[in-house]
Image: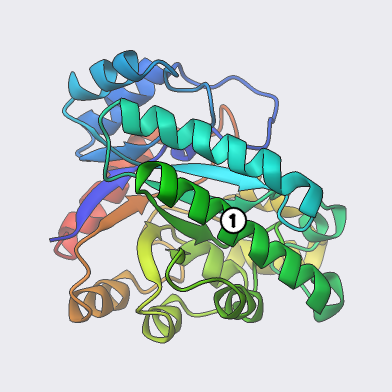
């Protein structure tokens, strides 16, 4: 049975260090529970409590599970790998000692930090990508982090492809899969980011079925994407204009996604994410609408 969660990014809690007012963590957790979700991811470090007992207390009071944590690392730079391992172990340790022994690390590139990738999100060309040597370094960093986390805490690591990072397009996801250890690094398939990057999430589910260990349910608005192309919007401007819309209002075929997941006997988490900027929109309203949509298609 697929379990449904939401994440702090749906309330504007993002890893980019953006300015703007966000809701306190207690309100976010309350609203995740009140809108019908069973779990959450950790969010940016320091948003939820960083003391294991306090973290467990706040989640258990709301009958919420903790299923993973997003860990961005500058994997292209070999000099950043040691710090990345340390950061991943710190986050994994928090989850482990809080009692969430089935959580996982959701590893990602240090998204939003390279100008060309931010400016051209959704319009990436091969010349904006990594060369072969950089891919080897990138993948080795992912393997090392995944190995360290597995050895220390037994956690799985999944890689989250992400627009405004170096793993965005279907071709880049394929390179990541080919260059990482299949026993260490799985894939977190994000339906919205995969579509925004130029691919079909159902194709990805079929192609990488043995490597997809975690799924993010995110929709994608092609009308906003076309506006972004015409106006040359950067990634954050596209998000501001609602590139990641409510589930069922965009281009992602969630009925088809669900059918393929069920065909593959997927029994993990599906994490609803509707990325917004800090202070943007009505997250609770959207969270409820997204949960109602999923109920309508059988989840």
Q: Is residue 163 left or right of residue 257?
A: right
Q: Residue shown at 42%/80% (left/top)?
A: 208
Its colouring scheme is rainbow
Q: Relative to the observer, which residue lies in front, 245 or 208?
A: 208
Instruction: Establish if 266 lies above or below 152.
Output: below
Q: Which residue is most to the front?
A: 151
- What percent of the width, then of the height, locates residue 251? 46, 71
Instruction: Say what secondary structure mark 1 lies in.
Output: helix
- What percent of the width, then of the height, locates residue 158? 46, 59
Name the residue that disc number 1 marks.
144
Classify the position of the C terminus by image quarter. bottom left
Q: Is residue 273 visible?
A: no
Q: Relative to the observer, which residue lies in front, 86 or 29?
A: 86
Q: Is residue 141 visible?
A: yes
Total numbered labels placed on residues in the image: 1
Q: Residue shown at 31%/74% (left/top)?
A: 257
- What percent of the width, then of the height, locates residue 215? 37, 61
- What percent of the width, then of the height, locates residue 181? 52, 71
Q: Residues within 10 Å of mark 1 (few under 14, many from 20)?
A: some
Q: Residue shown at 51%/48% (left/top)?
A: 148
Instruction: Establish if 272 lies above or below 221.
Output: above
Q: Is residue 216 left or right of residue 291?
A: right
Q: Is residue 292 left or right of residue 114?
A: left
Q: Is residue 69 left or right of residue 229?
A: left
**Could you say which quadrant of the image residue 126 lies in?**
bottom right
Classify the position of the N terminus by image quarter. bottom left
**Could you say which quadrant of the image residue 140 lies in?**
bottom right
Q: Residue shown at 36%/18% (left/top)?
A: 27
């Amino acid at each position: 049975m697929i379990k449904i969660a939401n994440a702090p990014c749906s309330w504007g809690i993002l890893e980019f260090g953006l300015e703007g007012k966000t809701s306190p963590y207690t309100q976010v957790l309350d609203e995740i529970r009140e809108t019908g979700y069973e779990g959450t991811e950790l969010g940016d470090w320091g948003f939820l409590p960083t003391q294991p007992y306090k973290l467990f207390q706040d989640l258990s009071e709301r009958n919420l599970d903790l299923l993973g944590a997003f860990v961005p690392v500058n994997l292209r730079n070999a000099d950043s790998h040691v710090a990345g391992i340390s950061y991943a172990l710190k986050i994994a340790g928090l989850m482990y000692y809080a009692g969430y022994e089935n959580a996982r690390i959701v590893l990602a590139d240090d998204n939003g930090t390279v100008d060309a990738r931010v400016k051209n999100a959704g319009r990436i060309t091969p010349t904006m990508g990594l060369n072969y040597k950089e891919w080897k370094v990138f993948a080795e960093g992912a393997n090392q982090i995944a190995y360290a986390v597995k050895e220390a805490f037994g956690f799985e690591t999944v890689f989250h492809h992400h627009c405004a990072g170096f793993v965005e397009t279907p071709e880049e996801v394929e390179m990541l899969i080919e260059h990482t250890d299949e026993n260490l690094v799985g894939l977190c398939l994000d339906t919205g980011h995969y579509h925004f990057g130029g691919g079909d999430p159902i194709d990805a589910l079929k192609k990488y079925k043995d490597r997809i260990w975690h799924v993010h349910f995110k929709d994608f608005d092609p009308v906003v994407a076309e506006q972004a192309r015409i106006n040359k919007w950067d990634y954050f401007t596209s998000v501001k204009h609602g590139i990641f819309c409510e589930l069922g209002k965009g281009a992602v075929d969630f009925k088809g996604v669900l059918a393929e997941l069920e065909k593959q006997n997927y029994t993990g988490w599906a994490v609803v994410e509707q990325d917004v900027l800090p202070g943007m929109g009505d997250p609770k309203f959207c969270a409820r609408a997204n949960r109602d949509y999923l109920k309508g298609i059988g989840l």
